[in-house]
């Protein structure tokens, strides 16, 4: 294989699609610095900001998701889809990729379908335990499908499945601080158990409201401290809540820019159950309490969480029960050292290491075989 193959990566919409895509691109560049990588995403989605920030070129398609509640709006969706298909053909004609990699999300549909029609080998990366609609539609003609969970034969042809795990940001595995030093980094007591509450860059309304409703309870629980990442949409309201109910054992912020240090500081992590988040928790061996988002296709976050809960590798609190149960669950869990140790051991056993390397092995194999 030549050292400068053209490789197309398509998909996005959420960090759960974008971070694995960037990890794959990073591994390709590590092995083939001269490789030409082009991303194709959806206009006005976060990949249009994150991918260029990582140093890669990206083209945005006007594609968007179908509106299941207001069918009339789908006339526009169909128009955008046909326009995206035309653009996808032109992109392939100009870029001439040796392979097209789909990581899920709106844009990967028209892009990977066009590649398959032109005989370009395609590789799919499915992050979740319940396969996304786009990847299911593309699976029949894909050359390989890289997954992170067992039992994916119910969605994909068994002979195409490669169990690789989900790639995560390599920086998360490179923290040089001890746990005491990580806690001190945030101005916290190094000797007190610490809960890290994360809701993604935009925030998780129910998780934030659960903390707000329990601030007085948290303030009285002086033997525990919290790192509370609220997301940009909820930063102001959460700051006001802390002004009204001061809690010296809570460190609140809109973003966590140094997630490696935040994870290192945490004795337990409260998180949504997105595939990338779960993969990070598995590889770091972090005890966790998962609050699946109900606002995702096919409720796949609940299925992701149950894959861990069924192996005693995580605790799940439903979104509906969060305000009543979440903080009490955090307090009882963090005070149970045996439970924490058991959760850490079991979630570590589920970790699949070297995911990006294994996926890129398959990418190069497909290029060579074509």
Image (tube, helix red, strand yellow):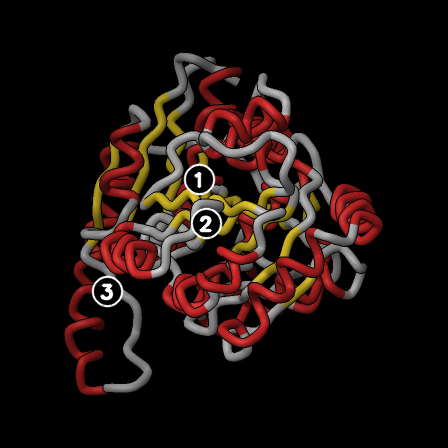
Q: Give the secondary structure at mark 3.
A: helix
Measuring from the top left, give residue 13's x and y in whole percent: 34, 53
Measuring from the top left, give residue 70's x and y in whole percent: 24, 86
Q: Earlier in the sequence, mark 3 or mark 2?
A: 2
Left or right? Give the position of 80 relative to 260: left
Is the residue under label 1 in contact with that under label 2 (CB below 8 Å)?
yes
Q: Could you say which disc has been placed on residue 185 in the image?
A: none
Q: Earlier in the sequence, mark 3 or mark 1?
A: 1
Q: CA distance from mark 3 to mark 1?
A: 25 Å
Q: Could you say which disc has been placed on residue 81 in the image?
A: 3
Residue depicted at x 69% and y 68%: 154
Q: CA distance from mark 2 to mark 1?
A: 6 Å
Q: Could you say which disc has been placed on residue 19 in the image?
A: 1
Residue 285: name its quadrant. Answer: top right
Q: Give the secondary structure at mark 1.
A: helix
333 versus 316 height, above or below: above
Residue depicted at x 37% and y 54%: 246
Residue under numbered circle 2: 16
Residue depicted at x 45% and y 71%: 297
Between circles 3 and 1, the one closer to the viewer is 1
Q: Callout 3 environment at 10 Å: few (<14), some (14 to 19), or many (20+)?
A: many
Foreground pick, 259 / 308 = 259
Residue 327: name its quadrant. Answer: bottom right
- Residue 143 shows in this picture: no
Measuring from the top left, give residue 163's x and y in whole percent: 70, 46
């Amino acid at each position: 294989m030549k050292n400068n193959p053209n490789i197309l990566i398509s998909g996005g919409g959420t960090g759960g699609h974008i971070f694995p895509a960037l990890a794959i691109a990073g591994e390709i560049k590590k092995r083939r610095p001269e490789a030409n990588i082009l991303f194709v995403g959806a206009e006005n989605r976060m990949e249009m900001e994150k991918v260029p920030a990582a140093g890669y070129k990206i083209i945005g398609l006007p594609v968007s998701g179908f509106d299941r509640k207001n069918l009339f709006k789908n006339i526009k969706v169909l128009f955008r889809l046909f326009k995206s298909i035309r653009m996808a053909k032109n992109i392939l004609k100009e870029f001439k990729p040796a392979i097209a990699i789909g990581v899920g999300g709106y844009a990967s549909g028209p892009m990977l379908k066009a590649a398959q029609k032109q005989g370009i080998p395609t590789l799919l990366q499915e992050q979740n335990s319940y396969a996304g609609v786009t990847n299911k539609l593309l699976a029949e003609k894909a050359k390989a499908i890289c997954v992170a969970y067992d039992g994916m034969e119910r969605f994909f042809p068994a002979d195409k499945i490669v169990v690789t795990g989900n790639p995560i940001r390599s920086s998360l595995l490179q923290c040089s601080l001890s746990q005491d030093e990580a806690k001190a980094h945030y101005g916290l007591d190094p000797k007190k158990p610490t809960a890290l509450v994360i809701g993604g860059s935009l925030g998780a309304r129910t998780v934030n409201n659960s903390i707000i409703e329990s601030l007085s309870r948290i303030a009285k629980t002086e033997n525990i401290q919290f790192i509370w990442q609220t997301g940009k949409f909820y930063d102001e309201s959460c700051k006001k809540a802390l002004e009204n109910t001061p809690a010296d054992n809570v460190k609140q912020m809109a973003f966590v820019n140094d997630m490696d240090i935040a994870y290192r500081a945490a004795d337990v992590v409260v998180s949504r159950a997105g595939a990338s988040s779960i993969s990070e928790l598995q590889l770091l061996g972090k005890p966790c309490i998962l609050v699946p988002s109900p606002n995702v296709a096919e409720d796949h976050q609940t299925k992701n969480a149950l894959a861990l809960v069924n192996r005693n590798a995580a605790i799940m609190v439903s979104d509906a029960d969060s305000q009543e149960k979440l903080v009490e669950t955090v307090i009882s869990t963090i005070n149970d050292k045996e439970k924490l140790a058991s959760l850490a051991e079991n979630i570590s056993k589920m970790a699949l290491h070297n995911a990006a390397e294994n996926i890129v092995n398959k990418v190069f194999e497909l290029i060579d075989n074509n």
